[in-house]
Image (tube, rainbow, N blue to C red):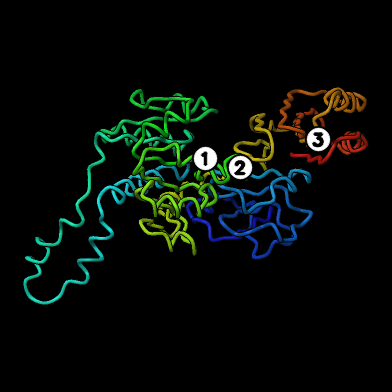
Amino acid sequence: MRKIHCLNPISEKGLRLLTADYVRSDTLEEAEGVLVRSADMHELTLPESLLAVARAGAGVNNIPCDALAERGIPVFNTPGANANGVKELVLAALLLASRDIVGGIEWAKGLTGEGIAKQVEKGKKQFAGCEIRGKSLGVIGLGAIGVEVANAAADLGMTVYGYDPFLSVFGALHMSNFVRYTQNLDEVFAQCDYLTIHVPLLSDTWGFFNMYSIEKMKDGVVILNFARDELTHNSAMHQALASGKVKRYICDFPNEETLAMENCIALPHLGASTEESEDNCAVMAVNELVDYLENGNIHNSVNMPDCDLGQRVKGEKRIAIFHKNIPNMIGQFTSAVASCNVNISHMTNKSKGQIAYTMLDVEAEDTEAIVAILNQIPGAMRIRVLG
């Protein structure tokens, strides 16, 4: 019986995929798998029994991915599972930025007495805005969310520029022909009335919107950030809003700084807060976790290479090995199996940075002697036998 612990409430639609071979544990103790959303895992003491962590969402800043990699523990995320929910909120933000809907609502709440209809007709002109059709939008980052935003904006009649120096095959295949792909970021800044960012938070994306990048943009630009708070340098944004260089800033990250900015609308982190997104993320996370625990396959790991050897064959054992990505490891593994007079029916190997992962399907009922030899090989980090 495998123990699974949820650090956050996880959609039942995903949890129902766990078979009778799994039990939901109320504590981390002896858990083999962890499902998490936003809980901070950096200060947690994680048990030796832990084999994998699955994040029901895309960002993994709350998980010590590098430390877990050193222990041979893959961390999974669910890219694209919440893409539609975020896309729809970004489209709403485009409209909030173009039409002073929030200001109009607040003003209307204060109307009193008779003749409200006349007051409305007299005062509504102060909330006049513009239409987004015919305006230009720059989408920075063309992953699952960015591509959906770009395509939807193009469908609404916007001129869309897409920027991503690391455009994936997925992004290229799913991007509309009406999106103008460019690798020239300065062109995006110079041409676009609106900018929206959809990139991970990395050392080279921290503070992406800063005084230098903002200076390159059109006067009166509107900036949307529904990716990560730290992608925006808040003091630079405050100054740009005050000067009028940036007309409006809409983000999903309220804090003391954003709440003090005039012409900033800070939503309470609603990006993936839809029932559908939570269901999709939970289903994807549970499937990734189960496939790894039962078959050793890795899909959508942020700290380990993707690797798939299919379902285990009945009557065979699968040996899964995390190891250092150094020469002659495969040769040593196969020699260890051969020294025990055992045949390898299938095998695969993938690497990611300094870590590699090898799976061997062996025609043996007892692998104890093989594992003993494998454990003596320098560079072998964690060995697991399935079946």
* Residue contact between numbered discs 2 and 1, judged by CB atoms under 8 Å: yes
Q: Is residue 53 above or below residue 261?
A: above
Q: Please state, as top left, top right, bottom left or bottom right, where the N terminus lies in the image.
A: bottom right
Q: Position of residue 82 (x, y in %)?
A: 45, 45
Mark 1 lies on a secondary structure that is: loop
Q: Position of residue 106 (x, y in %)?
A: 26, 66
In the picture, measured across the screen, residue 336 lies left or right of residue 283, that is right
Residue nearest the observer in this picture, 317 or 216? 216
In whole angstroms, how far apart are the C-alphas of marks 2 and 1? 9 Å
Nearest-to-viewer mark from 2 and 3: 2
Mark 2 lies on a secondary structure that is: loop
Mark 3 lies on a secondary structure that is: strand
Determine which quarter of the picture holds residue 204: top right
Q: Please state, as top left, top right, bottom left or bottom right, where the C terminus lies in the image.
A: top right
Q: Is residue 283 above or below residue 115?
A: above
Tell me the residue that label 2 is attached to: 202
Three-letter amino acid code of the residue under disc 2: Leu
Q: Which mark is residue 367?
A: none
Residue nearest the observer in this picture, 379 or 20? 379
In the picture, measured across the screen, residue 82 lies left or right of residue 47, that is left
The residue lying at 77 percent from left, 33 percent from top is 354
Nearest-to-viewer mark from 3 and 1: 1
Three-letter amino acid code of the residue under disc 1: Val
Tell me the residue that label 1 is attached to: 199
In whole angstroms, how far apart are the C-alphas of marks 3 and 1? 30 Å
Tell me the residue that label 3 is attached to: 323
